[in-house]
Image: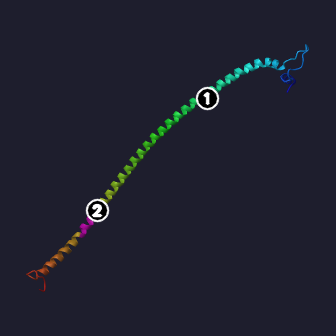
Amino acid sequence: MGTAASGILRRFRFHGVPGAPSAVGVPVDRAAEIAVELAPVLAALDETQRRAGQIVAGAGAQAARRRAGALAEAGRLVAEARAGAEVARATALAEGLATAEEERLRLLDAGRAEADRVATASDSNLGPLAEEVVRRALGLVALDGDDPDGGGPGR
């Protein structure tokens, strides 16, 4: 520190109570002298401290407003997301139902095609089978025809 600064600081150092006697022989109250000397400086600091308190209070109010706004925005976003989720669920359900319907129609067409194939195959096999059944039936009738009483052969 420079000498000027140390001289100023030395003036505020406590020198004892009530202090050294003055030339007149009355003790000097150094603390009172210091208080009187510092009163304007401390008064200026009071204004600064008051202003700092106002700034802190204003910042607190602004923080509360921002927090309330953020909470409102968060609530809006959550509501929007929930609505979007409902739409997404409905869309997914509709797509799932459409896919299931397509699969049902595809299986129904495949079943009809298989039924047509079986019917065609059975129709093509039915002719020879029917001929065999008729031939055997006629053969049985011919055997029964040997016996006019209907008792059968060898009776």
Q: Where is residue 86 shown, x and y percent of the image?
A: 43, 42
Q: Which amino acid does label 1 sit on?
A: Gly
Figure label count: 2
- Asked if residue 123 is among those painted magenta in the image, a careful observer would answer yes
The answer to if 109 sits in the magenta stretch is no
Q: Which picture quadrant has residue 143?
A: bottom left
Which residue appears farthest toward the left when viewing the image?
Answer: 148
Residue drawn at (13%, 80%) of the image: 142
Residue 151, x across and y down, in percent: 11, 82
Give the residue pinned by disc 2. 115
**Pointer 2 local density, CA inside 10 Å: few below 14, some 14–19, many at least 20:** few
Foreground pick, 66 / 98: 66
Q: Could you tell me how far apart the alpha carbons at marks 2 and 1 are, in whole angstroms?
A: 81 Å
Say what amino acid the circle numbered 2 marks: Ala
User: What main secondary structure does the magenta stretch of the protein show?
Assistant: helix
Q: In this view, does 47 lie to the left or right of 4?
A: left
Which quadrant would residue 43 be assigned to in this image?
Answer: top right
Is disc 1 placed on a helix, strand or loop?
helix
Decide: is 45 above or below 105.
above
Q: Which of marks 2 and 1 is nearer the N terminus?
A: 1
Instruction: Read off the magenta span.
Output: 118-125
- In the image, taking residue 98 as reference, residue 63 lies left or right, namely right
Residue 112 position in % (x across, y down): 29, 59
Image quadrant occupied by the C terminus: bottom left
41 or 143, which lies in front? Answer: 41
* Residue on which disc 1 sits: 60
* Residue 28 horizontal/vertical position (percent): 86, 17
Give the quarter of the image for residue 106. bottom left
